[in-house]
Image (cartoon, grey):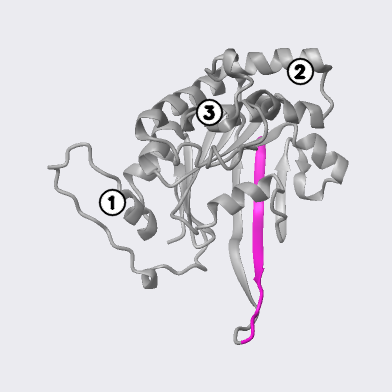
Amino acid sequence: MPLVEVAHLVKRFARRGGLLRRATEVLAVDDVSFAIEAGETFGLVGESGSGKTTTGRCLLRLIEPTSGSVVFRGDDVLRLSRSGLREARRHMQIVFQDPYSSLNPRMRARQIVEEPLVIHRVGDRTARRDWVAQLFGLVGLDTAHLERYPHQFSGGQRQRIGLARALALHPSFLVLDEPVSALDVSVQAQVINLLMGLQRALQLTYLFIAHDLHLVDHICSRVAVMYLGRIVEVGPAASLFETAEHPYTRALLSAIPAADPDTPRHRVILDPADVDRHVPLKQLSGEHWAAI
């Protein structure tokens, strides 16, 4: 049984009208379904505005979905009471894209990491501080810097603080919302290696949201491609990258920079007219599906 099972997830945003503009509705997530097995890294990719971040936040009910279901360890998260959701969030956490805006600039690093423990009333003050110090070491930070403020850390260090905060309650599932896109390339590899090491050590399950397909190919076992709120292709990473069938997936793959700049490239330009958003996913082979 999958650890996380998403079925027919829909999210609509109401856009207010103005003096000369009618009120409209934006369909950000349109009938999205996928499952994530325990211990795997499932990639969700697409360009900005494709709905991938909204999908990730709907899973944790940071944004309330319009309809659908998100089953986590046998319980539908979308039907949980306030107390039930509070308990579920101990096991489902998120690491945000921007490691600066997601940290309170008025709080010291120790307070930021300790905050989830205080909210959930875990342990006494001494036990919490000991665990925070352990978390700092776990994510590769110097415990001598626990009393520093976020602006006194580098971008990569701030992302490690966000990761330590997400791990504070011993979660089993993490939503990683473009966790390295705001970092320098030299730092990205360090954070990715840290995430992979933590996954092995703590038996974590990841939903990895990204637009960098080269990175997704490196760390994800399965990948779903989103276009205008819908999943248009999904399958094992190796299969999807080698034999992409949907025109949008092919366009994304053609944009990946080549290791050798002299290698001839064929850039695929997507014509939106070639994409019928209402075509259902069709099984191509094994676990590889595409809306073609």
In the rendered image, residue 222 lying in the magenta stretch gets the answer: no
Please name the amino acid that badge 1 sits on: Ser
Which quadrant is home to the C terminus? Answer: bottom left
Please give the residue where the numbered disc 3 appears in the rendered image.
152
- Position of 6 with respect to 214 (left or right) is right
* Mark closer to the chain start, 2 or 1: 2
Crowd tier of the residue under label 1, counting other residues whose Cα lies within 10 Å: few below 14, some 14–19, many 20 or above: some
Mark 3: few, some, or many residues within 10 Å (few <14, many ≥20)?
few
Question: Where 128 falls versus 58 (above or below)?
Answer: above
Q: Is residue 3 left or right of residue 267?
A: right
Residue 105 lies in quadrant? top right
Front-most of residues 56 and 8: 56
Which amino acid type is shown beneath numbered disc 2?
Answer: Arg
**According to the image, label 1 marks what residue?**
254
Can residue 32 be seen at all in this image of the molecule?
yes
Up/down of 24 relative to 278, above or below = below
* Residue type, numbered disc 3: Gln
Q: Residues within 10 Å of mark 2 (few under 14, many from 20)?
A: many
Residue 100 lies left or right of residue 233; in this view the side is right
* 16 relative to 74 in the view: left or right: left
User: What's the distance in space between the residues labelled 3 and 1, CA to CA?
Assistant: 39 Å
Residue placed at 63% from the left, 18% from the top? 135
Q: Nearer the viewer, mark 2 or mark 1?
A: 2
- State which region is magenta: 1-19
Residue 128 has which mark?
2
SS at mark 2 in the image = helix
Label 1 sits on a secondary structure element that is: helix
Q: Determine whether 190 is above or below 208 in the image.
A: above
* 137 or 52, nearer to the observer: 137
